[in-house]
Image (cartoon, helix red, strand yellow):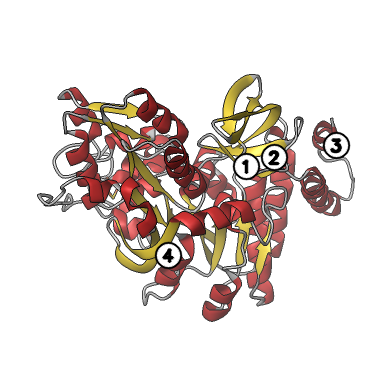
């Protein structure tokens, strides 16, 4: 398809890889923020085609993975109520909460429905005026415009039976957390192309400057990814710190202003807990007080939540680039996509799922 | 979940006060909210994520990226023969 196939052209990818080999003189550790990129890298075997000097570590950019277990438990509690229709992106259904997941709730008779777009959830609310419809609004900056439009649409339609359970996180505070850590190994970043499609990349130069770490806005096709790596390695080799854009067909410096303005109108910044990582200050968004009527956490009594994580799961360290999935003793043994212990094994963007799915013949689990 | 897929806008209409459209993903049509790309016109390409257009695709930039990468290849091989079909395809 146009704008997709041509960025998978093998000879062009090969040439860009050759250029990386030519440019690189010493080891560098890069992090791709976005789980979608992690999957593309594993799927196309880009990690194995790179010169050995370049190590890719995987970042926290998987909304399903970082949604804290408390919020999954709240979703389970809401979805278990008899008068509720609980709607969600499909990825969340198998994410383990404490002792169960949304599929379990559905098997026990709960009305849990997968939607493609949040506007579908609003439609369900319109069609079922006597029931409460709740949408699990997870996501990074990429998904915020869609999720909040559902609230604005519900408000415009005068719906009182629609609310969202918000689990929204932002990339820049996560970069501060990773780069500010004493254990950090990351020397350069591939920034998440679709986060930047919405937000632009004007938030990143001060972070690059503060930590002396170059960054490149990067897309999702193989050619985009190798180009992002090439530009980052060039900056590292030249000792240059800057934020470059290797995804110019989609991303501008300013980003989508209409979307940003709408986000400002509906959301306000807040501290958020990231699953396995902990609270990152100012790293999330929540609904502004004027939209409280659409806040599921205000609408439902959710006092009796006692979240518990699997003690085996090291996903938090994986999401910060400190460990890789095969470092987890449970990987492929107690933890598989069929019976996951952590969210990173479930999500289509989770690093554990990527390693499991695209593991190479002869490669140990 | 964060995946955005490029598609071609083939129809634009209004629904419930929102600018909506039909987007063609290689033959599969899907309803898409165009509220965040008010400038969108039929025939434009956009990146679609969970039923919303995030941004329109910039054709000139798309061509430039391919040209740039081809240049690397030409510089490398010194032959100038690499991947001409890629550039042809995108202009079509
Ligand atoms: S393999 Fe499973 S248990 Fe181990 S870190 Fe990944 S999700 Fe957690």
The spot of residue A225 in percent (x, y) is: 62, 50
Q: Along the polypeptide, which appears first: circle 4 or circle 1?
A: 4
A59 over A147 or under it: above or below: below
Q: Which residue is mark 2?
A: A7
**Chain identity of mark 3:** B
Q: CA distance from mark 3 to mark 1?
A: 19 Å
Give the label, 3 or 4, closer to the camera. Answer: 4
- Relative to B78, is A50 on the left or the right? left
Which chain letter matches label 2? A
Quarter of the picture containing the N terminus of chain A is: top right
Residue appearing at x 28%, y 46% in the figure: A296
Work out how far the residue at label 2 is from the one at label 4, CA to CA, in angstroms. Answer: 29 Å
Determine the residue positioned at 81% across, 31% down: B89
Which mark is first along the chain, 4 or 2? 2
Which of marks 2 and 1 precedes in the sequence? 2
The answer to whether residue A246 is above or below residue A108 is: below
């Amino acid at each position: 398809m146009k704008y997709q196939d041509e960025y998978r052209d093998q000879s062009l990818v090969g040439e860009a890889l050759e250029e990386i080999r030519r440019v690189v003189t010493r080891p560098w550790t890069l992090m791709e923020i976005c789980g979608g990129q992690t999957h593309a890298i594993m799927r196309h075997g880009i990690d194995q085609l790179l010169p050995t000097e370049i190590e890719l570590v995987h970042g926290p950019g998987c909304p399903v993975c970082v949604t804290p277990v408390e919020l999954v438990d709240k979703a389970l509690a809401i979805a278990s109520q008899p008068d509720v229709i609980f709607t969600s992106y499909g990825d969340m259904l198998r994410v383990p909460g404490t002792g169960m997941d949304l599929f379990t709730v559905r098997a026990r008779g709960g009305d849990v429905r997968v939607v493609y777009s949040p506007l579908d959830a609003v439609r369900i609310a319109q069609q079922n005026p006597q029931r409460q419809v709740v949408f699990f609004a997870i996501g990074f900056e990429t998904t915020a415009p869609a999720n909040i439009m559902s609230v604005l649409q519900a408000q415009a339609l005068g719906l009182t039976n629609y609310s969202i359970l918000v689990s929204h996180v932002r990339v820049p505070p996560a970069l501060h957390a990773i780069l500010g850590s004493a254990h950090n190994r990351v020397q350069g970043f591939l920034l998440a192309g679709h986060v930047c499609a919405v937000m632009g990349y004007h938030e990143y130069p001060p972070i690059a400057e503060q930590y002396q770490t170059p960054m490149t806005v990067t897309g999702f096709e193989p050619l985009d990814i190798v180009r992002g790596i090439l530009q980052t390695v060039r900056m590292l080799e030249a000792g240059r710190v800057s934020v470059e854009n290797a995804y110019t067909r989609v991303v501008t410096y300013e980003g989508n202003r209409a979307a940003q303005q709408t986000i400002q109108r509906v959301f306000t910044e807040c501290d958020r807990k990231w699953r396995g990582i902990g609270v990152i200050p100012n790293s999330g968004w929540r609904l502004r007080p004027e939209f409280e009527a659409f806040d599921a956490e205000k609408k439902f009594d959710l006092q009796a939540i006692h979240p518990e994580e699997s003690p085996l799961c090291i996903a938090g360290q994986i999401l910060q680039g400190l460990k890789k999935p095969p470092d987890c003793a449970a990987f492929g043994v107690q933890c598989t996509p069929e019976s996951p212990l952590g969210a990173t094994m479930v999500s289509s963007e989770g690093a554990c799922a990527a390693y499991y799915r695209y593991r190479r013949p002869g490669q140990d689990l | 979940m964060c995946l955005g897929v490029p598609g071609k806008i083939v129809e634009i209409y209004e629904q419930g006060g929102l600018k909506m459209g039909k987007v063609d993903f290689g033959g599969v049509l899907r309803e898409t909210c165009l509220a965040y790309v008010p400038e969108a016109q039929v025939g434009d390409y956009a990146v679609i994520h969970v039923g919303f257009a995030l941004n329109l695709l910039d054709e000139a930039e798309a061509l430039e990226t391919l040209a740039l990468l081809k240049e690397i290849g030409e510089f490398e091989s010194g032959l100038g023969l690499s991947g001409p079909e890629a550039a042809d395809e995108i202009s079509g």
